[in-house]
Structures are given as structure tokens and as C-alpha cells.
Amino acid sequence: MSTGTTKLDVVVSDVVPVNELVTRFHFRRRDGQLLPTFSGGAHVVVEMRDGERTRLNPYSLMGSPLDTREYTISVRRDDVGRGGSLFMHRHVRPGMEMVISYPVNLFSLDLRARKHLMLAGGIGITPFMAQTAQLAAEGGNFELHYTCRTASLGTYADVLRERYDRRVRLYHDDRDERIELDRLLSSQPLGTHLYVCGPSGMIGWVCDRAAALGWPAETVHFEHFAAPQPGAPFDVTLAVSGKTIRVGEQQSLLEAIEAAGVDPPYLCRGGVCGQCETNVIAHDGKFIHNDHWLSEQEHRSCKKIMPCVSRFEGGSLVLER
Amino acid sequence: MGITFRNETFRNDFTFRNSPEHIRRFPFPFHEDSYMYAVNIEPHVVGPKGSVLENLIDVDEHYVAEMQDRALVLAEDPLRCQSLPHMTLAGWDLLELLMEQQALGYPEHFTLTRDGDRWRWINRPLGIDDSFTFGDVSTLPYGPMEYITRQSQGDFCILDQRDGNLWMDAGMVTTQADWSLDFDIGMNFFEWHAPVPLAHEKGIFVRALKFLTNIQQGKPARRLNWTMTINPRLDTSPENYHKWGPDRTTVTPENVGDKVHLRVELQSFWRLPRSNGIVFPIRCYLIKMDELVTQPKWARRLHRVIRDLPEELANYKGLTRYRATLVEWLSKLDDGSPTSPGFGPD
Ligand code: FES
């Protein structure tokens, strides 16, 4: 039906360094109105005009859903990534006009839960900032376990401890503190839902242990935005629009399709929502699937690709787009 | 200029009528001379002035009478309104949506004033002026969903989204075409659609679910559905089948024009911002054959559609008993000339 979501014209109202890696950005509406209400766990896609290129990166909203005068996101600088976070850190200044998407929630709370058990790793803390604010306002029952490399990289650990005190438990890698996961998962009351957001290794570990300990799949929730990975350039033929394009080393396939003037659907740009799913018409080479949407079987079948995060290596690729 | 609300009934003496302007704005659901089941979903954006799409939440001349009928249904059967405990937040979302939309579309009839979470709602047609605290259930006479849907035309299903599926976990359903909230509450998308024939084979529902779970805030969608009802009865629930089922046997060549009604449902789909749920308002429009055939194009087209409807669909829509009588009656109004494209009257 349409591409992405409705857009919002915003102005950067503040830029606040949080620690050596993380900076927080505040947005307000240019027309002075309130921003749309959102639910804890939602993200927005931020459009970055970087010279010739437009980058579109998703970031979780971390403010309280009860206050829609501004949206806040936190961006961790990734010196070896494709440049979106560097752009935010280097070029975005207060007063700058930007465009962001309406909020989309692919990591929402299950409101039936009697207790919400949250596990965060590193910058994966951001969706929980909003979710805890939402739950605290409703008198919801939650407990947050947060792992970070060092105390100084424990983004918002101090804020969370101050707000929620003993409902927040911190673990520092440099002090060899570890979540006692099995004990934690085995000692939860009936009706608990588990949420995890962090590096993929952590998500995999938590989901595996939860399954092994008998947690039903519908009580385990994770947010797993894959960042598009750079890779060798490749050529693609878009059969429907009759174009042949080249996907650059630092570009995602979705970005290359957009740069050619074709408007495919997307929501998350992180391989989780399923919107960008595209049929493969012909191929001669190997797919590098990075999404969390298609099943393993679909990956092996070579009939579909998620262009927001996945790539291709080889002779030729023809897509139904 | 405000709406003149009609004083009419949807039961007993059935005094429901459409004014001439309302006949012309009727959402006639057939854009060509035949009908095939399809998902036909499109963006729910504002349509032409004077149509039922002029506002995204439509209020019309039947508003007051429909709200009175709803109150009667609820007094007899409170289970028509249910909300599972985790759905209260979604109820507030819906209250906000309906108050905002009604106040926006009909400022002469509805006013919403907000000062932080202190809200004041004035509903002039129903004589309501309430101040309450948004989010505090104790400041309203009913739960938020029940409160606002007692003041909004159409049925409302609120769906919780989890595990890649949608769950019918709350609703106000008093004007349904032969289905029951009490039966469907707590069911997921596939469970509550189970009785539709033909469609399952086509994987239509898998695609529809995928579409619905991706509905985004600020981008509602809609579709039209239709059936027929004998007498302008809003409440055709399974619970009351004994009241309306026998109506189907009462159609005669003499009373077709007065008794047989085309019933069109305008379903819209909205993402709710706080709860991340989805709400389906299902707005029901009724028009009796005598009124419908005042538009010659509609008379001709409806004749062809009903005549050529596949048997299973006719059965599913409950037309079988009176279809022949209806087709015969309509055929006299069909001179065989072509119909113009599109839904609207000529
Ligand atoms: S845009 Fe969400 S999976 Fe590609």
C-alpha cells in the first residue's frame, strides 16, 4: 500500500553527550504541536541527508510515552559501521531540521503479563527506558537486569537506579559480574513475560535458555535490529521497474533500490518486520541473509530476500521489484 | 449547519428511514455488475464532501436513534460489551481517537477540551457534558471503551497484537451481522474468521493478517463488506436469531421494497498508540430496496449482482430464502442498459 510510515517534520531541540560512546538527541515538532503518542518499545526511522546520500536508520524512542512534547533517542557511535551513527554524532546539531517517521512498535509489552522481566545489554537499554516509564506510571510490575562493559559505559544506569531503585540490577563485564540466567529464569512467578534487547549473542543465549527451561515462545520477546552489513559491491536487475543497479560496499540493497527511484515498502530497516520481503526471480551466486524474518528453510530456498539487511555475492541477481 | 437527527426505531415498528440526501450518500458497495469476494483493503483517507468518507469517523442522521438502540441491547444483554483486563489502556486509546475525530468532524455537535490529563467532553445530541481525568477509570461512569462506544455509531472490536497474530480481546458489538462477541472474545484472527467459505483456500486471510499487523499509526485502512437484512434491524446477533431469523420467511413480492435492506459495513482499521493494539470500527449502513432503487443505476446493478451471485456466497450471506423473490422484483427495474463505472449514483 505505501512505503514506510507517515513522516514527521522535526527540529533537533537538544544534543546531549551521555558518555564516550553514546549521545542523546531530542526532537520537537517544527510546527510546535505535540508529537504522536507512542507505546514503550517503539522506534522511529531517522532520515539523514549526508551529501548525496540519504541514510535511514531506526532508533528506539527512550522518553516516557506520557510526554509527547519531544522524542528522544540515544545513538551509540559505531566507528566501523556504515556511517549513520557517525553522521548523527558529527553533523547533527541543535536547531537542525530533520525528518523522522511516525513511531512503529515491533517490541511491544504484552499487557497481559503479571510481571515483566527485562534483560538489556549495552545500548539495548533504550527501548526499556520507555517501557519502564510506561509501566511505572501504571503501577506495572517489572524488573530490569542490565549488562554493560564498564560503569562509565552503563548508559542511563544511574538514571534507572534513581528512578526504580532495586527493581534495576546492574552487571559490569569489567568486574566479571554475570547475570545468573538459569536461576533468574527458573524463579519467576507464573504469568511473567521476558524481554531481551542487546547484542545478538546475548539475545540468542537468553532465548535458548528460556526455551530449554520451558518458557513458552509467546512469553519471550526480543528486539533484534540487525544493522545492514557492508560487503562487496554487487549488481541487481529489478525486473518490474526494468532497472539495473549496483549496490555499493557501504550501501544496503534497499538503499540502492531507493537510490534508483524505486519505492519499496519498509518499516524497520533491520530485518525484523517483514515489510521489505522481495521475491527472487533468478540468481547465480550466493545469498548473505542477515534478517530475522525469513525462516531457515526460506533462506535455503533462495526464493526471497530481505533487502534492508541482506546481500548477495556472485554473477547475477534478478528481483521482482 | 448541523445534522438533523431522526427519531426512529430499529425494532418493533421499524420506523428507520433514510432522507433523500442520505440515500445519495449511501456507500453502495458494487463498482461493477458482479461481485467476487476479495480483501479489497485501501487507505482510510478522507473522501469527497457529502459522502460517508467526508470524515474518517462518520456521524449521520441516525446517530441518536442508533445510540438509543444500543442502550436497549446492552440493558438486555450486557455481554455485548466486553474487555479483557489487559485491554483498558486500549480503551483509553479508543476514547481519545473517537473524541478527537468526532469533535474534529462535527464541532457543532461535539467538543473536546484537554488540559493535560483533565479532559472535558461535550456531546450535545446526547446531552452529555462530562469532565474526567484521562487514564483514571474511576472518573468515568463506565470503562473508557464502553463510555465512548455508547456514544459512537458502529461496532468496535479491539484487537491485541501478540505473537504475530491479532486477538479479539475487547469490543462493543450490538449491531453485528450474525456474529457474537461473547463467542469470539479471546480468539485470534484465524479462529474468528473460520466460517468464511472459499476465502481460506486462497490464502486471503494469511495476507490480510500480515497487512493488518503492519497497520501503522497515522495510516488507517478500510474495506467495505455487505450483506442483506430483512427489516432495518441493527441487532442481528446469533443470541437473537429467534427474533430475526424468521423474518427471512416473510418476504413476499408485495413487500420486497419495504422489507429487504442492503446492509453495508464500512470497516476501518487503526493502530492504537499507547497499547499498540488495533481497533476495527465496523460501521453499518442500511437502505431499503424502495430507497435504493430511487437511483436507477443502483437498481440495475444490484439486480445483476444478486442474480449472478455464486450459490455458496448467497448461502453464506443468508439470502437463499428470498433471493428469487428479490431478483424477480429487481428485474423489473433493469432495462438491460449499461451501468456507468464506479460506485456512485448517476
Ligand atoms: S524493512 Fe523490516 S524486514 Fe526489511
Image: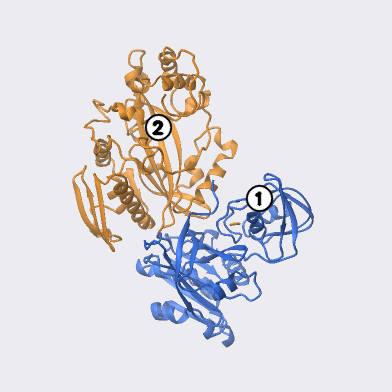
Residue depicted at x 56% and y 44%? B207
Mark 1 lies on residue: A278
Q: Residue B123 vs residue B105: left or right?
A: left
Q: Compared with residue B343, is residue A124 higher up or lower down, i.e. above or below?
A: below
Output the chain of dot 2: B
Q: Residue B277 vs residue A3: left or right?
A: left
Q: Nearer the viewer, residue A56 or B264?
A: A56
Output the chain of dot 1: A
Residue B27's disc number: 2
Q: Compared with residue A269, is residue B46 higher up or lower down, i.e. above or below?
A: above
Q: Quadrant of residue A239?
A: top right
Quadrant in which ligand 1 is drawn: bottom right
Shown in blue, the chain is A
Residue B246's disc number: none
Helix or strand or loop: what does disc 2 sit on?
loop
**Amino acid type of the residue tagged 1 in the rendering:** Thr
Shown in orange, the chain is B
10 Å crowding of disc 1: few (<14), some (14-19), many (20+): some
Q: Residue B244 vs residue B72: left or right?
A: right
Q: Compared with residue A284, is residue B61 higher up or lower down, i.e. above or below?
A: above
Give x and y (percent) for residue B322: 41, 19
Residue depicted at x 47% and y 61%? A108
